[in-house]
Structures are given as C-alpha cells and as structure tokens.
Image (tube, rainbow, N blue to C red):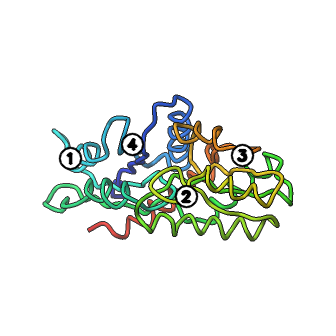
Amino acid sequence: MTPTPAVLIGCSHGTNDPEGRAVIRGILDGVRAVRPDLEVREAFVDVQEPAVADVVTDVVRPDGGASRDAVVVPLLLSGGFHVNVDVAEAVADRGDGAGRAVAATPLGPDDRLVEIAAERLRDAGVRPEDAVVVAAAGSSRPEAARDVEHVIAGLRALHPGPVTVGFGAMAKPTVGEAVATAREGASRVVVVAFLLAPGYFYDRLAEVGADVVTQPLGPDPRLAEIVLDRYAEAISRLP
C-alpha cells in the first residue's frame, strides 16, 4: 500500500491586499495542479489566519482522525526571522508519537527567481544603460541579505548597467536611499520588485523616486515548481 504523502503547508507572510492574497493562493493552486496527490494547505506568520503553528498542529495532532506528517514550505524569498523563528517553532518538538513535521528552506536563493526577475525587467522596458535597484523586503538576519545577493549577482551577469539593492525594512540601504544613489550615475532608475505578490511593501515602491517599478515575481508557474522542489528536499529530513 502506498503511504499517504506528507501534507504540504504553504506558509506566507500574509497581506490585506486582495490581489496579493490571490497571487499566493494561485501559487498553491499551481502546486495542486502539478501534484493532485498532495494535500496542500495555506498558513501565515502575520496578518492573516490560520497561523502556521495551528495548521501544523491540526495535521499532526488532529481532533479525531489519523495524524499526518507535515512539511511547511515558507513562501518567502529568503531566510530571516519568520523562517528561523516562526516556522521553525511551528515544527519543533513534533516527534512524540503523533505525526511528524519539518520545515523546508525558503524559495530563495534559486536561479529561477533570477530568471523571473530578469523577465520582469524586460517586460518593464529596461534599457542597457539603466541603473537597476533590487527592492527586497529586508530582515535583521544576515542570511536574508546573503540570499538576496544571489539575485544581485545573477542580474549583474545579465544587465550591463549597474545593479544594486535596497531594503524595505530592517536593513540598509533603504530602497529610497539606493534609488537616490543610483540616480547620481544614471539618467533612469528601474526598481525590480523582488517580492512574491502585491501588498503593503509593493505599494510603497511607488514613492521611492524610481522611473519604473517592475511587477512582482508572482504569478509565475516556476514558483510552484520551486515550492515542490523545497517540499521534496524536506521530505528526506522528516525526523
């Protein structure tokens, strides 16, 4: 008899933006389309419900019915507080005879994210001489900045003009500061919205003084592929 696959819990930050919610839901719908054998649930670390810890508990220690294994895939582009604290705590200490739980790594770094970001630049009409600023969410954790550096390096290999980074919070320079610095050496500045979906931070990018702001990375079918790859990598680490 084939064992039942672990439940895939796609955990995003959460947003009040209806379009942003639809994009995240669309990523998980893409996962369901590719893997109809998987049970896919949605969870959040902020703003929206249900909280990731509650969803994990519902899977591994259900009220009635058999317990299941769970893999939490952070729908986040880099490591940081939410990955290393919120998600990590949600799966901790789950090996007491109920279902098991493990956290996958975040979506980035991944070359496919660089490909999507490059496509968003082309769609926005980037020119070879334009200065490009990658707008990332930001985190106080150094691993988040290291993950974003993968994107910077990838775009520098593809774009002949300067490519720098700015952060929305918790890290320097801010996106506005990065745009102002880039303006000193270029007549046009294009901001790459290195974000999965529209939301509060994306709306703020209209205020940073760039000439062009790209669309977020989602929707894109490659995002579902990355989610499934993270799920597969995590399965082998179930305790």
The residue shown at (22%, 55%) is 99
Numbered tag placed on residue 99 in the rendering: none
Mark 1–mark 3 Cα distance, whole angstroms, equals 53 Å
Among the two numbered marks 1 and 3 on one chain, the one whose residue lies closer to the N terminus:
1
141 vs 186, left or right, is: left
Q: What element carries label 2?
A: helix
Q: What residue type is labelled 3?
A: Ala
Which of the two residues, 153 or 233, is positioned nearer the viewer here? Answer: 153
Q: In this orientation, does residue 116 appear?
A: no
How crowded pointer 3 is (Cα within 10 Å; few <14, some 14-19, many 20+) is rated as many
Q: Which residue matches tag 2?
A: 226
Among the two numbered marks 4 and 3 on one chain, the one whose residue lies closer to the N terminus:
4
Q: Which residue matches tag 1?
A: 66
Among the two numbered marks 1 and 2 on one chain, the one whose residue lies closer to the N terminus:
1
Q: Are marks 1 and 2 in contact (CB under 8 Å)?
A: no
Numbered tag placed on residue 41 in the rendering: 4
Q: Do the residues labelled 4 and 3 touch (CB within 8 Å)?
A: no
Mark 2–mark 4 Cα distance, whole angstroms, equals 16 Å
Q: Which amino acid does label 4 sit on?
A: Arg
The residue shown at (52%, 56%) is 77
Q: Which of the two marks, 1 or 3, is nearer to us in this view?
A: 3
Mark 1–mark 4 Cα distance, whole angstroms, equals 17 Å
Q: What element carries label 3?
A: loop
Which of the two residues, 97 or 201, is positioned nearer the viewer here? Answer: 201
Which of the two residues, 239 or 84, is positioned nearer the viewer here? Answer: 84
Total labels drawn? 4
The residue shown at (26%, 53%) is 90
Mark 3–mark 2 Cα distance, whole angstroms, equals 30 Å
Q: Is residue 226 above or below residue 195?
A: below
Q: Which amino acid does label 1 sit on?
A: Ala
